[in-house]
Image (tube, rainbow, N blue to C red):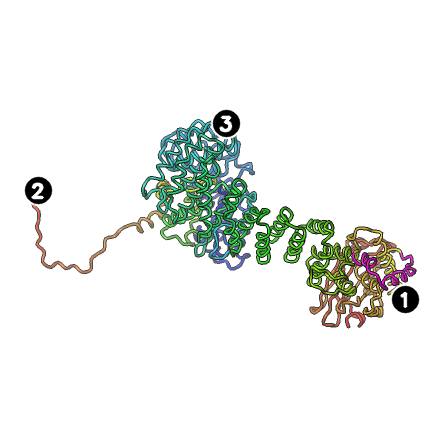
């Protein structure tokens, strides 16, 4: 079972915190701080597993983390999850975020925390892996967006413009020698 | 009034805040707006306010006033409201708050009204924070959703069922009959959820386990399809079709096949196929292969298959990817109990991993190495482990040290080797060993009669080099005390170094005086000195006999000093020395060396002992320094008395005595001190905090001052206490310290 999913930046500021077990607000902040402390001490070329999840439940728990540029992604899991499987889950998560935000960066996560929560909710539910198929996760987000109604329209308008494939206006039209055959279309008569 | 900020602007402002205090200010201002808006703001904007509040909550600020808003938003018909409301419920509410039960009704309505995204939200929230009562109330709704056709809601319903079974185990009866049918679905999300549900049910009840054994063929079929299917863009990660589903199936097969011949047989072929054909160039393939190996080892598989599995693990130990090596070490640790000899074959590789710079890897390697020690490899393994102990990170030292000691205890080939090993551990990592190591070693040495001479020589040399590691010092001083006479003779097994009596005494003295020695250690040293005085022949005997008549009845140490300070005339040296001598001789009656010693005993024993043993090279005791009265107020007096122990010229010991001749008692007395920067000050714990009225027993406290540069000594004292119903605070500097205290 996944006990918690945390994303924080290189200074330890939380960008996403989701706990799948009840903790008070103070306990949550303490967990984030300790986790940051443990994870930031790690070298670049060591393995992605850390023991030290004493705050979250028993000593069964491991921290699986991934460091990308300015963000740390940390999953705290117990022994019932496959360690290498969680590494693949990181991959799926990051690729889904990429798709959802178009080349996601830290600012996207900062300003659209609720959207990240929604994407995550499609992947992991109640501490268990729900869906790992990226197109499924993505399509559900689109489904939710369509239900969002008017309130979601500015965001949709922006992404609609982004997705529009405006044809390239040719700069140089070189007609040259063209033999244009006009077909004898019946309805033009 | 400043208008409420949009979410985006709010976040910008928070990011712009340069200090924690500034950030707090911005957030508090906005929270006030949010609160006002919740009370009487526009209901259409409520979801924006809650989003802002959730952001603030993530940063760690209190947000409990948003809980009721979550309920209102969930109850609203608009999707956008529900989405934020449910998210808020997941983040702000949990089963410890009573408010959480209030959303049960909303969830019930949302589950039954048929709009898929809304049902999805409700299920998600239920599976994250649903308490046992909520689960019981909503079980039937979730069951209905399990059976309806759309996969989006169905897969969520299945995982919600897992959560419900965890919270309220009696609900498993509802969900158990549906599982077998669900396995025939094709949607991978549904399959994944179903297998998780079956695993949960099997773990909870052996009857369920037996029931589900009949689906083993179906599972085998699904896995086979996945493995043999070609590349499918939908579910594949690095060329492996849905590795998550494969891993889950393998786990369930492990649970079902354990201790069951028939199921194991059904799986054998498939496991062999997966083990040999999986492409492990990428992580996904390795994940599947690991699960396969673990499953093979856990069920009744053919012997050849088991050998193959362990060899795969061995191969992974040599992989360049650290994650793979980590998982390999973890898996081998799981197997070491059941297949010890198979894992032994990979011992050299495991030992190699000890030298990793990665802390996680070396920790795993340490655990595995300790598990692999047996009587045939104990010498080489201990050597490796000792080398590791010298260079390993501090948090592993304790485990490593106790591991080596335990292994030595179980498999030591000879007693001498055992003693050597323990000695080595004590010198390298003495501070990290457990407390019973000292007792074990003393017992071991005591029992090995032929090795007494050898032990005492080794320990003496080790002690001479380093007196900081307390367990080593304790054992060594004990040993010297017991077998000191061997020490003075030559021992064939160690370097022939003539040890003089004086050297031994000097070393023990050094141990006594060192500020690094714990009271227990000092006790050991004192006992050793006394034992030596009986074992080593010489003029020391005459010295002891001579000093006996000096014993005068002195009463408790502190009273004397108090009397002295008032008279200010009585000569200082003899009184404290004799009373300390009395305490010292009391120790002779006391068999255990580590009794609780009052702090005032500290400055003198070496002085008294120096006198006692009459060593020719000891300097004569210095002229005493007169006492000093430094403070007086309403009957409360503070007096300082000074001692300069002869062996350490930089050390000054001040005993601060607080007396009370007034009518009211002094309580909560605390004395703090400050000295110039070049001087080091150490305060010991005072004898108490209360001085009763009318000259009751005073409080004494010892200050140790290290002044190697002989800087002029100034002392600033701060006193706080309660007297006559008032709290008194006094800060003053002691200027008139005698020159002899620091020169």
In which chain is the residue bearing label 3? B
2 and 3 marks on the same chain: no
Gap in angstroms between the C-alphas marked 2 and 3: 77 Å
Q: Which residue is mark 2?
A: A186
Q: Is residue B542 magenta?
A: yes
Q: In front: mark 2 or mark 3?
A: 3
Q: Quadrant of residue B389?
A: bottom right
Q: Which residues are magenta?
A: B528-554
Q: Decide which of B725, B57 is in the foreground and name it.
A: B57
Gap in angstroms between the C-alphas marked 1 and 3: 91 Å
- Residue B549 locus on image (x, y percent): 92, 60
- Residue A91 locus on image (x, y percent): 41, 48
In the image, farthest residue toward the front: B492
- Check if mark 2's residue and mark 1's residue have beta carbons within 8 Å: no
Q: Decide which of A24, B323 is in the foreground and name it.
A: B323
Height in image: B673 above or below B205? below
- Residue A109 locus on image (x, y percent): 43, 51
Height in image: B675 above or below B410? below
Mark closer to the chain start, 1 or 3:
3
Q: Decide which of B678, B493 is in the foreground and name it.
A: B493
């Amino acid at each position: 079972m996944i006990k918690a999913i945390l994303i924080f930046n290189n200074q330890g500021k939380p960008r996403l915190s989701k706990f799948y077990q009840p903790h008070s607000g103070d306990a949550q902040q303490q967990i984030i701080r300790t986790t940051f402390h443990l994870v930031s001490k790690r070298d670049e070329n060591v393995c992605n597993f850390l023991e030290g999840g004493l705050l979250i439940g028993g000593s069964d728990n491991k921290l699986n983390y991934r460091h990308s540029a300015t963000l740390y992604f940390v999953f705290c899991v117990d022994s019932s999850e496959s360690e290498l499987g969680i590494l693949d889950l990181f991959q799926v998560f990051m690729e889904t975020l990429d798709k959802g935000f178009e080349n996601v960066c830290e600012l996207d996560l900062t300003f659209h925390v609720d959207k990240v929560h929604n994407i995550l909710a499609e992947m992991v539910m109640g501490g268990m892996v729900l869906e790992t198929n990226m197109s499924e996760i993505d399509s559900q987000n689109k489904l939710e967006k369509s239900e969002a109604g008017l309130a979601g329209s500015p965001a949709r308008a922006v992404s609609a413009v982004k997705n529009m494939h405006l044809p390239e206006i040719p700069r140089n039209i070189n007609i040259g020698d063209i033999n244009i055959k006009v077909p004898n279309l019946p309805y033009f008569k | 009034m400043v208008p409420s900020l949009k979410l985006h602007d709010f976040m910008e402002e928070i990011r712009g805040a340069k200090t924690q205090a500034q950030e707090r200010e911005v957030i508090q201002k906005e929270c006030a707006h949010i609160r006002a808006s919740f009370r009487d703001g526009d209901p259409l904007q409520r979801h924006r306010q809650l989003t802002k509040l959730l952001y603030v909550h993530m940063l760690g600020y209190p947000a409990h006033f948003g809980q009721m808003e979550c309920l209102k938003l969930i109850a609203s018909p608009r999707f956008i409201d529900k989405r934020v409301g449910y998210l808020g419920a997941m983040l702000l509410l949990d089963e410890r708050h009573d408010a959480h039960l209030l959303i049960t009704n909303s969830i019930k309505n949302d589950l039954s009204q048929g709009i898929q995204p809304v049902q999805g939200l409700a299920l998600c929230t239920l599976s994250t924070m649903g308490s046992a009562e909520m689960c019981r109330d909503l079980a039937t709704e979730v069951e209905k959703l399990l059976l309806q056709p759309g996969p989006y809601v169905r897969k969520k319903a299945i995982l919600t069922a897992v959560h419900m079974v965890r919270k309220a185990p009696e609900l498993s009866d509802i969900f158990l009959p549906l599982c077998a049918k669900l396995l025939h679905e094709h949607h991978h999300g549904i399959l994944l959820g179903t297998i998780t549900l079956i695993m949960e049910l099997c773990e909870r009840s052996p009857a369920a386990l037996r029931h589900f054994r009949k689906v083993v063929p179906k599972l085998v079929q699904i896995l086979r399809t996945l493995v043999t299917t070609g590349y499918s863009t939908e579910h594949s990660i690095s060329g492996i079709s849905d590795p998550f589903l494969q891993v889950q199936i393998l786990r369930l097969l492990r649970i079902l096949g354990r201790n069951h011949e028939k199921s194991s047989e059904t799986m054998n072929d498939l496991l062999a196929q997966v083990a040999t054909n999986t492409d492990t160039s990428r992580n996904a393939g390795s994940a599947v292969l690991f699960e396969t190996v673990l499953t093979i080892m856990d069920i009744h598989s053919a012997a050849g298959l088991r050998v193959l599995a362990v060899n795969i693990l061995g191969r992974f130990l040599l992989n360049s990817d650290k994650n793979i090596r980590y998982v390999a070490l973890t898996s081998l640790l799981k197997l070491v109990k059941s297949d010890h000899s198979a894992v032994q074959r990979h011992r050299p590789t495991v030992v190699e991993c000890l030298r990793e710079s990665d802390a996680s890897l070396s920790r795993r390697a340490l655990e595995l190495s300790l598990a692999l020690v047996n009587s045939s490899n104990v010498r080489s393994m201990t050597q490796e482990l000792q080398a590791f102990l010298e260079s390993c990170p501090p948090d592993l030292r304790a485990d490593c040290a106790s591991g080596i000691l335990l292994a030595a205890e179980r498999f030591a080939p000879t007693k001498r080797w055992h003693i050597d090993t323990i000695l080595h551990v004590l010198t390298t990592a003495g501070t990290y060993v457990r407390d019973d190591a000292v007792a074990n070693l003393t017992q071991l040495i005591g029992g090995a009669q032929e090795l007494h001479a050898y032990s005492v020589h080794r320990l003496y040399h080790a002690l001479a080099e380093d007196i900081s590691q307390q367990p080593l010092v304790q054992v060594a001083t004990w040993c010297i005390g017991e077998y000191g006479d061997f020490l003075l003779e030559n021992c064939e097994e160690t370097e022939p170094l003539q040890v003089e009596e004086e050297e031994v005494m000097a070393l023990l003295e050094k141990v006594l005086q060192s500020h690094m020695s714990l009271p227990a250690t000092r006790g050991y040293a004192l006992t050793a000195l006394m034992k030596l005085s009986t074992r080593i022949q010489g003029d020391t005997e005459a010295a002891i006999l001579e000093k006996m008549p000096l014993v005068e009845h002195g009463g408790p140490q502190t009273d004397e000093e108090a009397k002295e300070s008032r008279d200010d005339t009585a000569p200082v040296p003899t009184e404290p020395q004799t009373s300390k001598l009395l305490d010292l001789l009391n120790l002779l009656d006391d068999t255990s060396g580590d009794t609780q010693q009052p702090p005032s005993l500290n400055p003198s024993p070496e002085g008294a002992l120096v006198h006692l043993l009459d060593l020719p090279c000891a300097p004569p005791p210095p002229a005493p320094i007169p006492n000093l009265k430094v403070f007086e107020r309403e009957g409360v007096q503070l007096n300082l008395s000074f001692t300069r122990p002869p062996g350490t010229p930089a050390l000054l010991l001040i005993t601060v005595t607080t007396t009370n001749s007034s009518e009211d008692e002094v309580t909560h007395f605390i004395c703090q001190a400050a000295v110039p920067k070049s001087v080091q000050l150490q305060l010991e714990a005072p004898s108490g905090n209360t001085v009763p009225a009318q000259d009751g027993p005073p409080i004494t406290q010892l200050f140790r001052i290290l002044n190697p540069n002989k800087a002029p000594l100034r002392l600033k004292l701060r006193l706080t206490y309660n007297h006559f119903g008032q709290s008194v605070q006094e800060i003053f500097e002691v200027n008139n310290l005698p020159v002899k205290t620091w020169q």
